[in-house]
Amino acid sequence: MEFSSKLLENAVNEMSQLPGVGKRTALRLVLHLLRQPESQTLSLSEALSAMRSTIKSCKSCHNISDTELCEICSNPHRIDDVICVVEDIRDVMAIENTSSFRGLYHVLGGKISPMDGIGPNELHIKSLVDKVKKGQIKELIFALGSTMEGDTTNFYIYKQIQDLDVKTSTIARGISVGNELEYTDEVTLGRSIINRIPFEASLKS
């Protein structure tokens, strides 16, 4: 792809590094930005810069946040002794959109996957186990995608806490095996949380 401007080429190269964005799509997006008022492009640039430099990870659940404690964890109306364990922030957003869960979350930051070099120490598992050990959590809901990696992660966490006084459950299998939560429709996901089953029962299925 030939460019008449080095500045344009640099912008396209940077844009094309985004997931699912090839060079042609990147070029179309960059040209679109060039056609917009300069103030709009600057607003986008400033928003991205501010997000990258000031966004935080919630010190309690590891969700993204503007403050040390995210809005969900700091909400006094949430049920603070029920925690939904998810893979990443997209799952938090998906579950919140169902309006079916009023507890708190714990974002692992991924799933155990030896093939990808991701072990328990690369995830936020220890901080979750520490929460349970404090004795203030009544229930953990495993809401990882129903993949081999998700099931492995669920089982690993379960083994770490099975001797502690906490109920463990998993979302009902209204979600197809192999599917990720973020792509599941809100009604199905909401029902899966409401109709969750004891985790021990899922091991027998």
Image (cartoon, rainbow, N blue to C red):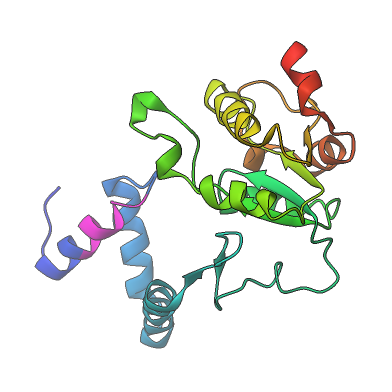
Range drawn in magenta: 11-18
* Whole-percent x, y for residue 123 in the image: 46, 44
* Residue 94 or residue 23, whichever sits in front: 94
Horizontal side of 99 relative to 179 (left or right) equals right
- Considering every residue shown, the one lying at the far bottom of the view is 39
* Residue 126 or residue 91, whichever sits in front: 126
* Whole-percent x, y for residue 92 in the image: 66, 53
Image: 102 above or below 42: above
Residue 31: quadrant of the picture: bottom left
Residue 64: quadrant of the picture: bottom right
- Considering every residue shown, the one lying at the far top of the view is 205
* Whole-percent x, y for residue 105 in the image: 68, 54
Horizontal side of 25 relative to 84 (left or right) equals left
Horizontal side of 18 relative to 146 (left or right) equals left
Quadrant containing the C terminus in the rendered view = top right
Question: What secondary structure characterizes most of the magenta part?
Answer: helix
Image: 182 above or below 198: below
* Residue 70 or residue 129, whichever sits in front: 129
- 82 falls in the magenta region: no
Image: 36 above or below 163: below
